[in-house]
Image (cartoon, rainbow, N blue to C red):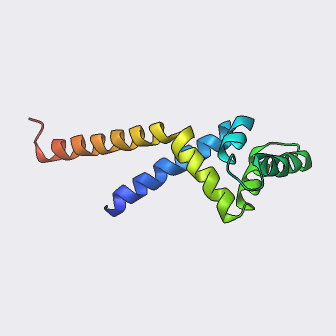
């Protein structure tokens, strides 16, 4: 994988992670932390406590909750977002980017003529 491809893949993942942060639901917590030894409500309750402390918005408390999760819970959340929640979208966006790059390369080399 070239440097440009890895940057594109990272941008694609970043896009969907931020999309989730903007559009989260309670059900996301239930599904993402379904297999947590602490239960899904543990992270939900931590998040709700932070929302109550910061009444301006939910993004800041959500990010604070995610950053303070242990490795297991961050991995559970990341796996949920990149597979069940947005897995198809991530793959399709990566395919579209690859297709557009291929067409651009063909156009630059005159292969489209």
Q: Residue 29 lies in what quarter of the image?
A: top right
Q: Nearer the viewer, residue 71 or 110?
A: 71
Assign the C terminus to one quadrant of the image. top left
Q: Is 12 on the left or on the right of 105, as rendered?
A: right
Q: Nearer the viewer, residue 42 or 66?
A: 42
Q: Residue at x 59, y 46 (%)?
A: 80
Q: At which x and y percent is residue 73?
A: 68, 57
Assign the N terminus to one quadrant of the image. bottom left
Q: Is 70 on the left or on the right of 82, as rendered?
A: right
Using the rendered image of the protein, determine whether residue 20 is visible from the camera's viewpoint.
Answer: yes
Q: Residue 94 lies in what quarter of the image?
A: top left
Q: At which x and y percent is residue 12?
A: 47, 48
Using the rendered image of the protein, determine whether residue 25 is visible from the camera's viewpoint.
Answer: no
Q: Nearer the viewer, residue 75 or 62?
A: 75
Q: Nearer the viewer, residue 91 or 56?
A: 91
Q: Residue at x 48, y 51 (%)?
A: 11
Q: How many marks?
A: 0
Q: Is 75 on the left or on the right of 97, as rendered?
A: right
Q: At which x and y percent is residue 2?
A: 31, 62
Q: At which x and y percent is residue 66?
A: 71, 55
Q: Residue at x 50, y 50 (%)?
A: 13
Q: Residue at x 39, y 59 (%)?
A: 6
């Amino acid at each position: 994988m070239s440097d440009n491809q890895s940057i594109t893949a990272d941008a694609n993942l970043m896009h969907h992670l931020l999309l989730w942060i903007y559009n989260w639901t309670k059900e996301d917590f239930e599904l993402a932390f379904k297999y947590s030894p602490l239960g899904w409500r543990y992270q939900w309750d931590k998040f709700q406590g932070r929302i109550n402390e910061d009444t301006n918005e939910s993004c800041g408390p959500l990010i604070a909750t995610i950053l303070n999760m242990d490795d297991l819970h961050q991995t559970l959340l990341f796996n949920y977002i990149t597979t069940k929640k947005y897995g198809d979208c991530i793959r399709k966006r990566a395919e579209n980017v690859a297709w557009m790059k291929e067409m651009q390369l063909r156009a630059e080399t005159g292969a489209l003529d």
